[in-house]
Image (cartoon, helix red, strand yellow):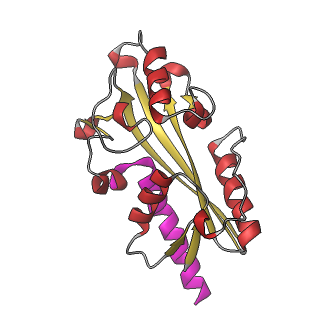
Amino acid sequence: MEIVLATRNLDKVREIKDILSGSEINVLTLDNFPQIPELVEDGDTLEQNAYKKAKTVFDITGLLTLADDTGLEVDALDGQPSVYSSRFAGENVSYDDNVNKLLEVMTKVPQNKRTARFRCVIALIGPNIEQFAEGICEGKILAEKRGLQGFGYDPVFFVTEYNKTFAEIPLILKNKISHRGLALQKAITILKQIAATDK
């Protein structure tokens, strides 16, 4: 089975490829399709963004496409930044810019009010298929960065069960417990059902 990843985020590509390895799925990236334009995320929800990206790539390639949209939902910020997670500090900003802004706006939030979750929605769009999968990982936001691995908000997203941030957890473990890992496991189940039907 071939599947196209509808993202140009190399960190996401690496994680998704790692999780899908061993699943007999041949992963193609947007590097294989230079004609695909920049994918715009202007939806109001993670579902809308994931769907739009997957549908755009599928319409151009005709191949089964997987897109995800991920948001950090902070309770003290009424669920924000959510769909704006990658541009929380503005357009064309770095991971550090977004993390620094988050820490700044949460300066006065007490430790017991810093609960948050990562939510990932995956859209699978292909011939005669439009399906979604979701993964959620609960945690809290630290007051300072910890760890050197991962990307995005990983250095401040603390997973209580492991007493570590995502940036301190080895990738193989993160991919089992993370929002994206959990969503992809559900997506793999859907893909296996598709493959079984096609036989």
Q: Position of residue 177 (x, y in %)?
A: 35, 50
Image-based side of 194 in relation to 180, left or right: right
Q: Is residue 15 above or below residue 198?
A: above
User: Residue drawn 67% across and 74% down?
Assistant: 63
User: Residue drawn 37% across and 29% down?
Assistant: 140
Q: Residue furthest right?
A: 59
Q: Is residue 193 above or below residue 8?
A: below
Q: Is residue 132 above or below residue 116?
A: below
Choose between 93 and 198: the one closer to the eye: 93
Q: Position of residue 100 (x, y in %)?
A: 44, 23
Assign the N terminus to one quadrant of the image: bottom right
User: Residue drawn 49% across and 27% down?
Assistant: 97
Stretch in magenta: 176-199
Q: Position of residue 43 (x, y in %)?
A: 72, 41
Choose between 116 and 100: the one closer to the eye: 100
Image-based side of 147 in relation to 192, left or right: left
Residue 6 is inside the magenta segment: no
